[in-house]
Image (cartoon, grey):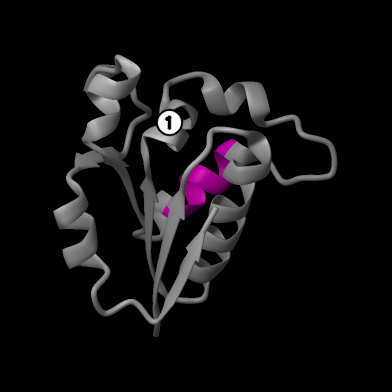
Amino acid sequence: MAKVAMVCNSAEPGKIFPPFILGSAAAASGDEVVLFFTPGGSLALVKGKMEEMREAKGLPDLIELYDGVRSLGGKIYLCELALEAKGLKEEDLREGVEVVGATTFMNEIKDATITFSF
């Protein structure tokens, strides 16, 4: 079993799908998955935003991928800097998103064997 860490720096669909596709595949394979969204990727975690992207042609259902990562024990973190930088509140976020500092994320992934950045 590996630990897989991914950082998402953008809320554009082309940057949102890969972490959830790869994250759900890794989690389904038994790997520990940690997804970290920077302020640049934070808006994708606002309630309703994934629903706007879920009908992307030729891609899997984004909500099913999100739910799959979570149900298989994956962690979905949002950098705490995004709250002030993007004017967000924790209640604006999807269920299952945990707001953490960069130190918490770095501590969590210090033994990651696979890392990606999107």
Q: Is residue 48 above or below residue 53?
A: above
Looking at the rendered structure, the secondary structure element under dot 1 is helix
Q: Residue 77 location in percent, x, y?
A: 30, 46
Q: Residue 40 location in percent, x, y?
A: 44, 34
Q: Residue 4 location in percent, x, y?
A: 41, 71
User: In the picture, residue 83 is in which quadrant?
Assistant: top left
Outermost residue to the top: 87
Amino acid residing under circle 1: Leu
Q: Is residue 7 above or below residue 2?
A: above
Residue that carries the numbered disc 1 in the rendered image: 45
**Start-end of magenta stretch:** 63-69
Quadrant of the image containing the N terminus: bottom left
User: In the picture, residue 58 is in which quadrant?
Assistant: top right
Q: Residue 85 location in percent, x, y?
A: 29, 23
Which residue appears at 45% of the width and 70% of the height? 115
Q: Is residue 109 magenta?
A: no
Which of the two residues, 29 or 4, is positioned nearer the viewer here? Answer: 4
Which residue appears at 62% of the width and 33% of the height? 12
Q: Is residue 69 above or below residue 98?
A: below
Q: Is residue 65 magenta?
A: yes
Q: Is residue 108 above or below residue 103?
A: below
Residue 93 placement, left or right of 65: left
Residue 78 placement, left or right of 15: left
The tally of labels here is 1
Residue 74 placement, left or right of 24: left
- Assign the magenta stretch its main secondary structure: helix
Outermost residue to the right: 58
